[in-house]
Image (spheres, rainbow, N blue to C red):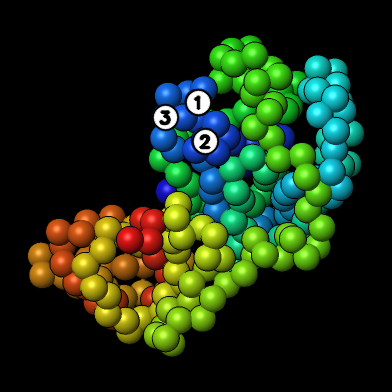
C-alpha cells in the first residue's frame, strides 16, 4: 500500500502481469493495482486520471508514439476521467495509465515495483529504467492495447455491498486475487487479519488484546494477524487494506 499525492501529472506507463514477470523478470508477481481517491485539490491540478485506450491501438502505432515521445497523441488516445473523493479504480496489469496532479490517493498493489514507461520526456530517469532493462519490443508486448469503452471501464469501478452495514467492499471481484479493500465505519468488530487501516475522518480508537491506539484523521495503522481480533469505536471513517482473498 502507498499514499500518492503527485505535484505534477505522473508519466504514462503500465505494469506487467505475473505471466510476463515470470518469463522475463524472474518474479511470480506482476503489478495490478487499485486506486482510492481521497482528495482532489483543484488549485494544484485538474483532478483527472488517464486509464486505458478508448479504442484498440496497433502495436506499430504505440511503438512510434514511444520512439518519438509523442505524448499528446498517447494522452489523446486514452480515457481521460475527472475524479472526485470517493472514486475508486481497479487497474489490471497491462493497462496504460497516468494520475494527474493535485490528487491524493491510496494505492494498493501487488508486491513489486515493475513499471514500463510509455512517456519519459521531461522526467529525470535513466534509459535503463524505462523498460526494466528489456528490449523495447519485448517490454511493450506486455501492454494492453485493447479498447476500454464506458461499459468496460465501469467494471473497474464497482463497489460491493457487505452483510455488515458498517463495511463496503471497494474493488470488483477481479481484484481479490491481488488485494482487497473496505470502507469501514465504527463501531465495528473484525476477526484477526493482516490489515493496514487508514483513517479518512473522525476520531475514535482501535482496541485489540495488546492495547488501544487512538485514531484521528490521517492515522495509518498496521495491524498484524498476530494482534488477534480488534474493534473500532468512536466515530471513525476509514479504509481497511487487506491481502488477497484466502
Between residue 207 and residue 69, name the one nearer to us. 69
Q: Which residue is found at the position 64% from the left and 32% from the top?
A: 142
Where residue 43 appears, as percent x and y from the top left, is 73, 52
Answer few, some or many: residues within 10 Å of disc 2's Cα (few below 14, many 20 plus, some between 14 and 19).
Answer: some
**Splitting the image into 4 quarters, where does residue 205 fall?**
bottom left
* Left-right relation of 29 to 57: left
Where residue 231 appears, as percent x and y from the top left, is 24, 77
- Are the residues tagged 1 and 2 within 8 Å (C-beta)? yes
Where residue 69 appears, as percent x and y from the top left, is 82, 22
**Splitting the image into 4 quarters, where does residue 98 fall?**
top right
Disc 2: which residue = 19
- Are the residues tagged 1 and 3 within 8 Å (C-beta)? no
**Splitting the image into 4 quarters, where does residue 180 fall?**
bottom left
Which one is closest to the eye, mark 3 or mark 2? 2
> How many numbered tags mark residues here?
3
**Regarding mark 3 in the picture, which secondary structure is present there?**
loop
**Regarding mark 1 in the picture, which secondary structure is present there?**
helix
Q: Which residue is found at the position 10% from the left and 70% from the top?
A: 209
Give me the disc on residue 27: 3
Amino acid at each position: 500500500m502507498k499514499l500518492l499525492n503527485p505535484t505534477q501529472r505522473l508519466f504514462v506507463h503500465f505494469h506487467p502481469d505475473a505471466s510476463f514477470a515470470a518469463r522475463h523478470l524472474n518474479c511470480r508477481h506482476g503489478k495490478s493495482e487499485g486506486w482510492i481517491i481521497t482528495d482532489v485539490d483543484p488549485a494544484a491540478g485538474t483532478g483527472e486520471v488517464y486509464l486505458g485506450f478508448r479504442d484498440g491501438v496497433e502495436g506499430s502505432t504505440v511503438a512510434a508514439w514511444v520512439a518519438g515521445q509523442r505524448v499528446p497523441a498517447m494522452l489523446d488516445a486514452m480515457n481521460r476521467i475527472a475524479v472526485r473523493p470517493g472514486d475508486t479504480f481497479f487497474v489490471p496489469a497491462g493497462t496504460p495509465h497516468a494520475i494527474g496532479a493535485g490528487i491524493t490517493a491510496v494505492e494498493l498493489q501487488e508486491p513489486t515495483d515493475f513499471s514500463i514507461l510509455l512517456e519519459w520526456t521531461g522526467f529525470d530517469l535513466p534509459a535503463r529504467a524505462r523498460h526494466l532493462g528489456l528490449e523495447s519490443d519485448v517490454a511493450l508486448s506486455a501492454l494492453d492495447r485493447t479498447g476500454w469503452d464506458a461499459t468496460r471501464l465501469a467494471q473497474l469501478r464497482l463497489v460491493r455491498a457487505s452483510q455488515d452495514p458498517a463495511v463496503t467492499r471497494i474493488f470488483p471481484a477481479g481484484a481479490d486475487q491481488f488485494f482487497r479493500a473496505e470502507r469501514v465505519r465504527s463501531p465495528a468488530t473484525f476477526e484477526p487479519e493482516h490489515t493496514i487501516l487508514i483513517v479518512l475522518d473522525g476520531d475514535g480508537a482501535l482496541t485489540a488484546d495488546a492495547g488501544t491506539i487512538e485514531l484521528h484523521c490521517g492515522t495509518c495503522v498496521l495491524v498484524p494477524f498476530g494482534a488477534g481480533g480488534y474493534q473500532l469505536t468512536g466515530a471513525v471513517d476509514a479504509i481497511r487494506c487487506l491481502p488477497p482473498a484466502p
